[in-house]
Image (tube, rainbow, N blue to C red):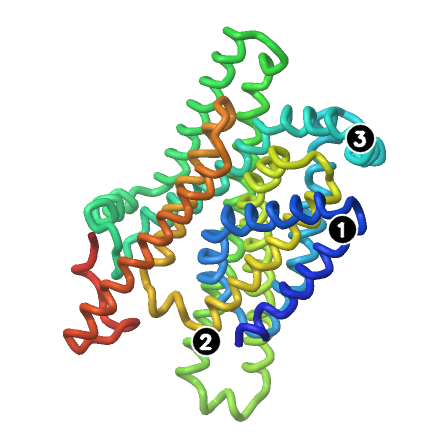
Amino acid sequence: MILKTFGWSFVITAVGLALAVLYDGWTAFGIVAILSILEISLSFDNAVVNAGILKKMNAFWQKIFLTVGVLIAVFGMRLVFPVVIVAISAKIGPIEAVNLALNEKEHYKELVTDAHASIAAFGGMFLLMIFLDFIFEDRDIQWLRWIERPLAKLGKVDMLSVAIALGVLLVSSMTFATHAHLHGGAHADKGETVLISGIAGLITYMIVGGLSGYFEDKLEEEEEAELEAEEEAKKSGKGAASAVLLAGKAAFFMFLYLEVLDASFSFDGVIGAFAITNDIVLMALGLGIGAMYVRSLTVYLVRQGTLDDYVYLEHGAHYAIGALAVILLVTIQYEINEVITGMVGVVLIAWSFWSSVRRNKRLAAEGGDFSEKAEVSSGV
């Protein structure tokens, strides 16, 4: 099972490290290895959240996630994305941006750092919306009941998560603009950029998340209709064909949602990588290897049914998302060490795993079922 799920990750690791040695010797080997570990540690919560979505997709779309999705993640976010943001922020062509990345690495790093505010605003708002929509939803299984129960009641207010997110963005942009104005410098005119980027992140979440949710609901309705009229469906192939088509649409938009989610998670990894190297080739190799392991881990969690057995993992991952969203928004103005960013997610997920183990032991002692028993009295 391990080899089947992580086989391609092992292969990519071997190839990536070999290419690093050929590119710039054993120093490059060490840099790529460190970047891989950095990406995995920063994105473990990404794997848990992805697994919660991916388990609703069939084996075909899981393979698409591990193939096409990896190409998008590695070449799109870890290689093309840094070049694109440099081209946009510096108002230069993509070819010139590539030339900067390969031949003027210090200047390239400066341009990417300069674009950090807009990147953090976009990614922070997207991730914040994911966290708010999760925490405001009323659910049977609750982890931190003293927080989740009152927030679930507040969640009955329409558009509350959007209002809070916009309020946070407004405060962030105004604080950034005021600080920049008082201290002068190159960032004095970027408060508006932060606001626009954050709104773009919010719109992206609402469009992609809304479409995936719409088709997922349609798919569930179709499945319920098929169960009720199973005998009639056997007489004609129309019902089966319709379900396959609808499943395809639902899976496509869920796949699209996963890619945008991965992009938002990768912002901190891409920016953090510049603390280790300015070389875009080594960055792509290291972060690409890490991204591959995150995807394999996602599929492993789905196939092992880990989220069903350890029911608080998804809660812990969403709290980690909320923490990462706050961290990204804070880094618009203040620098935060990548080790802190990674450890926050690891600690929250480890805590949720430990809570899940305690829950399972308690249910086993009571003769209960791990995955089916309602947890209305749960919480820490």
Amino acid beneath label 3: Leu
Q: How many marks?
A: 3
Q: Is residue 4 above or below residue 64?
A: below
SS for callout 1: helix
In the picture, the disc for residue 223 is 2
Distance between the alpha carbons at the discs numbered 3 and 2: 53 Å
In the picture, the disc for residue 82 is none
How crowded pointer 3 is (Cα within 10 Å; few <14, some 14-19, many 20+) is rated as many
Q: Residue 320, percent across and down? A: 40, 46
Q: Is residue 337 above or below residue 140?
A: above
Amino acid beneath label 1: Val
Residue at numbered disc 3: 100
Q: Residue 14, percent across and down? A: 69, 61
Q: Earlier in the sequence, mark 1 or mark 3?
A: 1
How crowded pointer 2 is (Cα within 10 Å; few <14, some 14-19, many 20+) is rated as some
Q: Residue 235, percent across and down? A: 54, 93
Place residue 48 in its image quadrant.
bottom left
Q: Is residue 80 left or right of residue 167?
A: right
Which residue is at 41% across, 29% downward?
Answer: 168
Residue at numbered disc 1: 21
**CB contact under 8 Å: marks 1 and 3:** no
Which residue is at 35% across, 39% downward?
Answer: 160
* Tag in front: 1 or 3: 1
Which residue is at 78% across, 44% downward?
Answer: 24
